[in-house]
Image: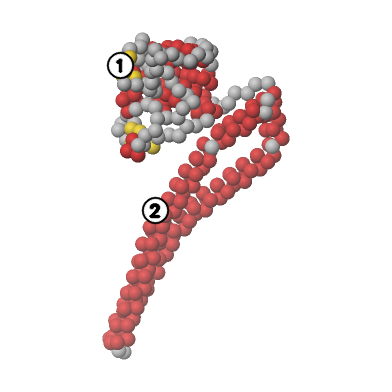
Amino acid sequence: MNIDTFSAGLIQSLTARGIDRQTASEYTGTLIRTLTEEDLREIAGYRTGDDFAALSESMAKLIREKSAPKAAAKPDMNTKVIHTEPVRPTDVGTHRPLGGDMEQTKTGIAPVQPEKAAPVRHSSDAMEHTKIGVPVQEREAHSLWEEESTRQGFVPLTGRSKAIFWGSVILTLPLTVTFGALLLFIFVLCFVTVCALIAASFLLIGGEVVAGTAGLLVGVIYGIIQICTTSAGIGIYEIGLGIICGGAALALGVLTYHLAVQGLPYILRQELLFGRYFLRQVKPMINRWREGCKSER
């Protein structure tokens, strides 16, 4: 089970236990950002939601306890303060040292603190490790709609916000269609231009080969004739000039070949990558739009 499937399954499990979806997403996001390599290996071994049922049950209980109103009372001298640590999947059914004291709970899971950032790490610990052992940069916190949209689709709209969204879509449709058509035209034009330059480069290589070979043969043959009939100096000069023409044509052919097989295809790949990146931004932009319409209620 990968991390996205685990996160979606944990949110669904918490929702089934009576926790609202936004709170479940916040607690799950905090849990995901504090996972270690050992936790990721543990999650990779999960197959179904029953494998982390104890974890979701404990998290639901702790969320309900944290959400319940607390009586405002000062702790007396006999009250024992327990310092907690972030929840980890591998902590279920274990004994953990909490704040220097060995405490035993039913699940061994400490309450999640969604309002706090991830624990501060030193520079040597600033890189997380995946389950294949490759260090990756720790991901920054994302907004709730961005996490939800990547897993479940568009931000849901109801009532007046849906009317505002579709009304704005219809009103801005001419501008949207014009802008999209312009971007598509520019993309196709650049793509066709690069492909035409690649084809022209190969034709240019053929012309350079023919011109260089002709210059070399003419210079050598004419130089030999001059050596035999007129002057040795003039003949050597003509031979050298022919060799220079052949060498210059060879150098230009190598440069043109390098441009045709490496330079222009690299530009073409970058253009395709940019197009794919732009298409991936369409969904987040629509979600930002829907989120703005939702906040206008």
Looking at the rendering, which quadrant does residue 216 occupy?
bottom left
Q: Earlier in the sequence, mark 1 or mark 2?
A: 1
Residue, disc 1: 102
Which residue does the numbered mark 2 point to in the structure image?
262
For the residues labelled 1 and 2, the Cα–Cα distance comes to: 63 Å
Amino acid type assigned to the residue bearing label 2 in the image: Gln
Q: Residue at x 69, y 28 (%)?
A: 164
Vertical comparison of 103 with 272: above or below: above
Observer-nearest of 96 and 237: 96
Classify mark 2: helix, strand or loop. Answer: helix
**Quadrant containing the N terminus in the rendered view:** top left
In the displayed structure, 17 sits above or below 27; it is above
Q: Quadrant of the C terminus?
A: top right
**Rendered location of residue 5, percent (x, y):** 42, 22
Residue in the foreground of this view, choosing between 192 and 6: 6
Is residue 257 among the parts visible in the rendering? Answer: yes
- Above or below — where is 241 with respect to 98? below
| Residue reaching furthest to the bottom | 230
Left or right of 166, for residue 31 = left
Q: Amino acid at mark 1?
A: Met
Q: Position of residue 88 (x, y in %)?
A: 37, 21
Q: Residue at x 34, y 70 (%)?
A: 247
Give the x, y percent position of residue 279.
53, 38
Q: Decide which of 126, 145 is in the foreground and name it.
A: 126
